[in-house]
Amino acid sequence: MNASNVQNGLAGRNNQAPSVDFSGMQFIPVTRPHPWDPERQIETDLCFMNAELVNADFSGSILPKTNFMNAKLTNANFKDAKLPNACFMNAVLDNVDFENADLEGVEFMNADLTTARNLDKANLTGATFGGRVQFPPGFDPYVHGMR
């Protein structure tokens, strides 16, 4: 599967998101025009904005600056993935596994991480949160290097 297939939509039959295996993949950043400010450029690997992904496997993938804004991920696997400076703003991360994931500099503004697994085992150095972000019960973002 190439990036254009991902960006052009993932809905399968009956608008159900298929299982997608991205494990071990490395994506190269691309620069594209900002959607509402043509003077600016955005550097991103992939755009999963507004995507609904079920059972997506990103384990071991390298995905810097990937956009998951407004995405709904269910049972996704980010074990050992590298996602520096990715964006999960307004994302719903239902039963998503972040074991040993590198989430340095990731933005979690307004994200729902209530049922996220192994968030305490991820590198969250410099990751940001705010707004109505929801963490798993007992999770302290400051203890794990978030700001």
Image (tube, rainbow, N blue to C red):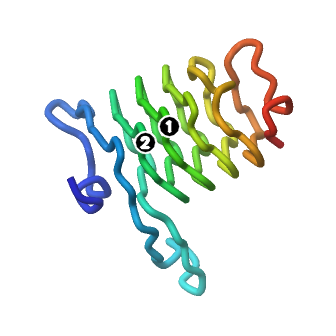
Point out residue 10 in the picture as x, y percentages from the top left corner: 26, 44
Question: Vertically, is 46 above or below 12?
Answer: below
Question: Label 2 is placed on what type of residue?
Answer: Gly
Q: Is residue 143 left or right of residue 19?
A: right
Question: Vertically, is 134 above or below 82?
Answer: above
Furthest toward the top, the residue is: 137
Which corner quadrant of the image does residue 116 belong to? top right
Identity of the residue drawn at 41% across and 58% down:
46
Whichever of callouts 2 and 1 sits on the residue coming sooner in the sequence is: 2
Which corner quadrant of the image does residue 117 belong to? top right
Seen from the viewer's position, the closer of residues 123 and 67 is 123
Point out residue 79 in the picture as x, y percentages from the top left corner: 48, 32
Q: Which residue is mark 2?
A: 60
Question: Label 1 is placed on what type of residue?
Answer: Asp
Furthest toward the left, the residue is: 13
Identity of the residue drawn at 38% across and 43% down:
51
Which corner quadrant of the image does residue 30 belong to? bottom left
Q: Are marks 2 and 1 in contact (CB under 8 Å)?
A: yes
Question: Vertically, is 95 above or below 23?
Answer: above
